Image (cartoon, helix red, strand yellow):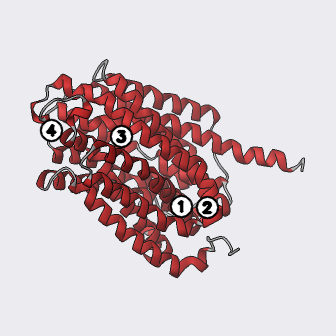
Amino acid sequence: MTAANPSARRARSPLLTVFLTVFIDLLGFGIVIPLLPVYSKAYGASELSLGLLFASFSAMQFVFAPFWGRVSDRFGRRPVLLGGLVGTSLSYVLFGLADSMTGLFVARMLAGFFGANVSTAQAYIADVTEEGERAKGMGMVGAAFGLGFTFGPLIGGELAAWSIGLPGFVAAGLSGCAALYGFLRLKEPPRTPEGSSRLFGLQTMREVTENGRIGCVMLLYFLGILAFSGFETMFIRFGLARFPTVFGIEGALSDATLDQVLAAAPIAGRYMFFIGLVAAVIQGGLIRRLVPRFGELRLIVAGPILLGLSLVVIGLAAEWWVVIAGCALMPFGFGINNPSLNGLLSRAAPAARQGAILGMNQSLASLARVLGPLLAGGLFGAIGPGAPFLAAGAILGLAAGIATAYRARHGASFRADPPAG
């Protein structure tokens, strides 16, 4: 008993440090992201331009996330994580200084280039956890993300009421603090050296295409992010268009003044706070109980079903309380789906290639975040405010079907489900 306690403390310590590092950084991320729809409207941007703004960040991540993953496999998790935090801080400074859509595009593209922190943190978790505990560890990263999206939008919305640039500067300071904290507390984890793999090689892509388990989990993750990114992009614009009085705007949104649009930012932040709070509770606490009881393979079926249902409810809503009901259901689907998929993926990936595989997954997720906002913006403009959410529900229905087939085919290989009885 005595000998086990120091070991347990060592196992918990790096997880806690990674959690705090990612949380502080994603708090800054949460401050900025929900404000983009409001700011872009203030600058006169269309829904399609807003989709392109979200896509610009993700396009850079799509190109560079696998590269940063391979760099972390070769040179270490710690320098990549800290360097990404410093670069992200710089991007937020530019966001705070931006006074046009061009400035916002430059800031978001730079943030995308340096945005390797989440996939690198996931690889770090994979290095320091046993396979059976992997989903729980990934849930901590998810909880950090959820908490960032809980308090970040709330803080960002209130700050925007003081100054349009203030949220960016505060976000920059938080990422800088995360980098400093990581520099002081974060140790390089023990890992298997990658060996001869090159930074710009095709080995990772071959592993994804040749390993059916890895490829299918990545497809499911891609579809989930594709659907959810449309919600992230268009939820505030949806609310402004269909329920403007909820955001303090009387009459048509097209007639709103700049001050009215900016005044909507605190209200938008409060609603995103509610969604993030539930998601953080699920990913940080409930997932620890659900995985041992139901198994990851059951959860990756239930997750898209719940998430898809919530988006359909929002898309069909004729009253605001129905939208709130959909938002209350949404974090349950998102909160159980992502940690379960990340846990399955890290268990299928070779030990020496965790960073590369998780980086590739982050890259595909970034591609989904490129396509999702563009699809949502196009549907919003062409059909109406509810169309992006209904389309996302259909995508998640497809994901649930694929997950069901995946569980039937690969369940025995992963042995992820708990024994009967």
* Residue located beneath label 3 in the image: 111
Q: Say which residue appears at 33% left-offset and 43% top-offset.
A: 321
Give me the C-alpha separation between circle 1 and circle 3.
27 Å
* Viewer-proximal residue among 146 and 78: 146
Give me the C-alpha separation between circle 4 and circle 2.
43 Å
Q: Say which residue appears at 37% left-offset and 37% top-offset.
A: 271
1 or 2: tag closer to the N-terminus:
2
Question: Dot 1 lies on which element?
Answer: helix
Q: Say which residue appears at 38% left-offset and 33% top-offset.
A: 270
| Other residues around mark 3 within 10 Å, as few (<14) / some (14–19) / many (≥20) | many
Give me the C-alpha separation between circle 3 and circle 2.
33 Å
* Viewer-proximal residue among 337 and 15: 337
Q: Inspect the image, locate mark 1, and give the three-letter code of the amino acid beneath it.
A: Ser
* Residue located beneath label 1 in the image: 340
Report if residue 80 is visible in the image.
no
4 or 1: tag closer to the N-terminus:
4
Q: Position of residue 170 (x, y in %)?
A: 41, 24
Circles 4, 2 touching at the beta carbon (< 8 Å): no
3 or 4: tag closer to the N-terminus:
4
Res. 309 mark: none
Q: Quadrant of residue 73?
A: bottom right
Residue 147 against residue 164 in the figure, above or below = below
Closest to the camera, between mark 1 and mark 2, is: 2
Q: Inspect the image, locate mark 4, and give the three-letter code of the amino acid beneath it.
A: Ala
Q: Position of residue 83 (x, y in %)?
A: 48, 39
Q: Say which residue appears at 47% left-offset and 28% top-offset.
A: 174
Give me the C-alpha separation between circle 1 and circle 2.
8 Å
Circles 3, 4 touching at the beta carbon (< 8 Å): no
Q: Position of residue 72 (x, y in %)?
A: 52, 51
Circles 3, 2 touching at the beta carbon (< 8 Å): no
Residue 404 against residue 313 in the figure, above or below = below
